[in-house]
Image: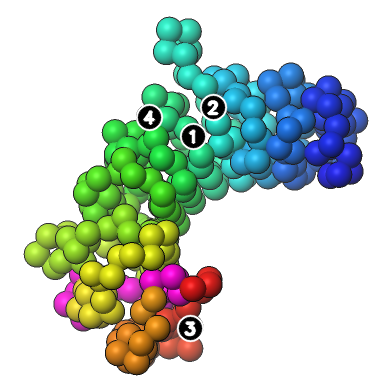
Amino acid sequence: MSELVHNGQKSLTARVLGRVKGNLEEFRAPQASFAVNSLAALSKCKELRLLDLSFVSESIPTAALLRTISTLDKLDTLHLPRSSTYDKTKELKMYDWPPKLRELHINGGIRDETGIYFSNLPSTLTSLLIGNCPHLSMLSIGPLLEAKGSQLRYLAITAPMPMLGESINYVLDHTPNLFRLRISFDLLSPEFFDAEMSRSDTWRVRVLDLDCFDQSISEFETSILWHAIDSGVFQNLRKVRLSKRLGWTDTERGKRGVREIDDLLKALAREDGSGAEIEEADAGVVLFGKR
C-alpha cells in the first residue's frame, strides 16, 4: 500500500484513509499525495496513535491541521509537516491538541508565528523534538519551554537552527525534570558547560546526547565536558552519547579524554548504588553515527 499511496493522486490518499479509518493506528503520510483535501478523511481515523506528516511536501495551514487532529483522542505521537502556513489576519482561534499527546516532533520550515499554537499543548506531553528548523528562534521556543518545560522528560534540539542564538545555553533552566537531553554541540557555547554561569542545582539530566552538524567546531575538547561533570554542572549525569562527527576519537589524546569521561560516569554511577535510574553497567560513554 505504501508504494501505491506514494505514487497515487491526492484524492486516492483521502479514499484510502476513508477505507481504513476504523482500524488505522499508525499513518506515515506520503510526500506528494497528501494535502489539505486529505484532512477530512484523516479526522475520522479515531484509532490513530501515531501520525507522521514529516515527509509531506505541500504546505498545510497550521490552523486547519490542528482543527483536524484535535478530534483524535488516542493520538500519542505526532510529527508535524515540514512546511506549514500561518495567516495572522484569519487564524486567531486557538485549537486544542490531542488530549493524550505524549511526543511531538517539530521540523522543517515552521516559523516563529506558529508558536502561538504551542501555548496550549496538553499536560501529557513528555517528549519534544525540534530539529532542522532554520526559521525558528528562541522567540517561540523560549516561551514554549517556559510554559511546558517542567513536564518534559526528553528534549531534543538539533541543528541546523541558525536563529537560536546564545539563549539556547540556558535551555535546561526551563526543564528541571528532564531525564534526557539531545542537542547539537555546534549550537552551544562554552557557557553551557560553565559552573559559574549555570543553575545546575536544578538540573536532573541523566542522559546527554551530543549530536554534531558542523564538523568544524574544533575549539571544543573532551576536557570541557569532563570538567562540567566533575564540577557538578551535570551532577546527575550518568550516560553520554557522543556523535562520531565531533571527531573526539580521531586522535589518541581525544580517545584518552573520552575514556576519562567514561571512567568518571561509571564511578559516579557506582556511588549511586544498586536501584539507581542508571546503574554502573549502563553508565558511561557511547559513540553513535558516522564520522
Mark 2 neighbour class, 10 Å CA radius: few under 14, some 14 to 19, many 20 or more:
many
Kindly identify which numbered label has been placed on residue 109: 1
Q: Nearer the viewer, mark 4 or mark 1?
A: 1
Q: Which residues are magenta?
A: 230-246
Report how far apart the C-alphas of labels 4 and 2 lie in the structure. Answer: 11 Å
Which amino acid type is shown beneath numbered disc 2? Ser
Which amino acid type is shown beneath numbered disc 1? Gly
Closer to the N terminus: mark 3 or mark 1?
1
Marks 4 and 3: in contact by CB < 8 Å? Answer: no
Report how far apart the C-alphas of labels 4 and 1 lie in the structure. Answer: 10 Å
Instruction: State the SS at label 1.
Output: loop
Q: Nearer the viewer, mark 3 or mark 1?
A: 1
Closer to the N terminus: mark 2 or mark 1?
2
Mark 3 neighbour class, 10 Å CA radius: few under 14, some 14 to 19, many 20 or more:
some
Q: Which residue is mark 4?
A: 112
Instruction: State the SS at label 4.
Output: helix
Quadrant location of residue 217? bottom left
Q: Is residue 46 magenta?
A: no
Residue 230 percent location from the top left of the image:
21, 81
Which amino acid type is shown beneath numbered disc 3? Asp
Which amino acid type is shown beneath numbered disc 4? Asp
Q: Is residue 206 above or below residue 256?
A: above
Marks 1 and 2: in contact by CB < 8 Å? Answer: yes
Instruction: State the SS at label 3.
Output: helix
Residue 81 percent location from the top left of the image:
59, 35
Q: Nearer the viewer, mark 3 or mark 4?
A: 4
Q: Is residue 245 magenta?
A: yes
Marks 2 and 3: in contact by CB < 8 Å? Answer: no
Closer to the N terminus: mark 3 or mark 2?
2
